[in-house]
Amino acid sequence: MAFLSDTLARVKPSPTVAMTQLAAELKAQGKDIIGLSAGEPDFDTPDNIKAAAIAAINANQTRYTAPDGIIELKQAICAKFARENGLSYEPSQISVSTGGKQVLYNAFIATLNPGDEVIIPAPYWVSYPDIVKLGQGTPVIIEGKPELGYKITADQLEAAITPQTKWFLFNSPSNPTGAGYSWAELKAITEVLMKHPHVWVMSDDMYEHLAYDGFEFCTPAQVEPALYERTLTVNGVSKAYAMTGWRIGYAGGPVALITAMRKVQSQSTNNPCTISQWAAVEALNGPQDFLVPRAEAFRRRRDLVCEKLNAIDGITCPVPEGAFYVYPSITGLLGKTSAAGTVIGDDEAFATALLEEQGVAVVFGAAFGLSANFRISYATSDAVLEEACARIAAFCDGLR
Ligand SMILES: Cc1ncc(COP(=O)(O)O)c(C=O)c1O
C-alpha cells in the first residue's frame, strides 16, 4: 500500500516558490541576487489597517469566530461588492477564508467530482491546475494569444466546453501576464457562457485595484447579470491592501455554494485569523485614497520595465493593463548559447542561466503553462528594476 495518496502524486509543488528558494540559497552563498519572482507588493500595509488589528487584540477579539467570517467583515464585503462592482450580495452569500487561495480550494473541493473539467486560460496562476487536481477534477487548458496580450477569445472558450465542463476559471487582470479584459472582451466571453447553462464561472478578481492607463476593471456577473446565479466572485485584501501575510480572501456567490464551502472550511482550518478579519474590515471600510498613488507607482514601473525589455533583441514584451507582472516572450532567443555555455533550449534554461550568470531571479513561462516566456514581478524599486533590466540586457547580448 502506497503511503502517499494518488491525488497528491498528481500535484506538483509551486515553481514560483522553488525559484524564490533557489535565489535565496544563492544569496545566502554571498551572491549578488535580484529577486523578481515574488508575487507581492513591496508596499507596507497601511497604518490604519495595522491600528485596527492592534485595537482588535486589545479588545480581546482573539477567539474563534464563525467558520467563514465575522458578520462585520461580511457586511464590509457586501458593501465593497455593491460600491465597486455593482453586485448585490447578502452576508449569507459571502465566504471569508485564509487568503484567496483557500477560497478557490474550498470551492473546488466542494464542487468537483472525478471527471469534472475546469477550463483554465493559460498562462495561468501556477496554483489553479493543481488545486483542481487536488479536488479530483481535470484542468482543461486553453492558450491565450500573444497578439492579444495572452488573452483568450470567445471562440477558444466555446471550443473547449464539453458536457463535463463544471467551471470556467477567469482571472483579470492576470497573474502572470497582467492582461486585463475590457468590458467588450468580457462580454464576448459571457455570451458563450450564456449558451452553456451547466458551466459555472469562477472569477478571480485579486488584482482588481491594480489597473493602469484608465483601464476599467469589470467582472463577469457585472457584465452579464444573468450569470450571477452561477458565478463565484473571488477577491481578497492581499494585493490591493498590501496584506499578503494577513491571509484574508473572500467570495460572493449563491447560498448553496457558499454553504458547501463553509462545510469544507469548518472541517479543515475553521475560521480565518480573527485579528486579520478585523484588519480587513478596516481595509474595506476605511480610506481608499492610497490605492491611486500606489497604482500610479506600479504603472511607472511597468512602463520602465516594458521599455527596457522591448529594447532587447529577441525579447517581446506586451504592455499589460494591470497587476504587477509582465510576461515577455523569448522565442527569438531559443537555440542560442549563453556566455557561460548554456544552450537556451527552453524558458526554464533561460531563467536558470539568467540567475546563475547575472543573478536575476525570474520565473520561467512553462510554470504558468505557456512558453517560451518568463514572468517578472515589478513590485520593487525603480533602481532595482533598472539594474535588473541592465543585467537581462547584458545576458541577452552575450547570447550567441
Ligand atoms: C491570481 C491570484 N489569485 C489568487 C491569489 C491568492 O492570493 P492570497 O494571498 O489571498 O491567497 C494569488 C496570489 O498570488 C494570485 O496571484
Image (cartoon, grey):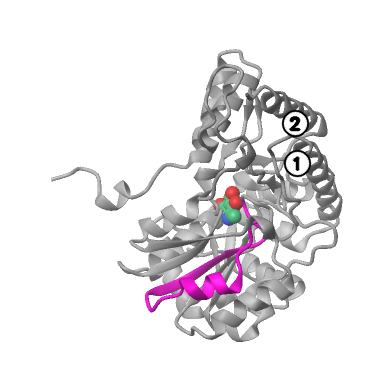
Foreground residue, 353 or 134?
A: 353
Residue 31 location, x and y as percent?
62, 15
Farthest residue to the left: give it: 1
Give, as a single range, the part of the protein colored magenta. Answer: 150-175
> Can the viewer see residue 228?
no
Of mark 1 and mark 2, the one earlier in the sequence is 1
> Which three-letter amino acid code belongs to the residue tagged 1?
Phe
Foreground residue, 178 or 209?
A: 178
The quarter of the image holding the C terminus is top right
Residue position for label 1: 43
Foreground residue, 175 or 79?
A: 175
Residue position for label 2: 389
Is residue 374 one of those drawn in magenta?
Answer: no
The quarter of the image holding the N terminus is top left
Secondary-structure class at tag 1: loop
Q: Quadrant of residue 205?
A: bottom right
Secondary-structure class at tag 2: helix
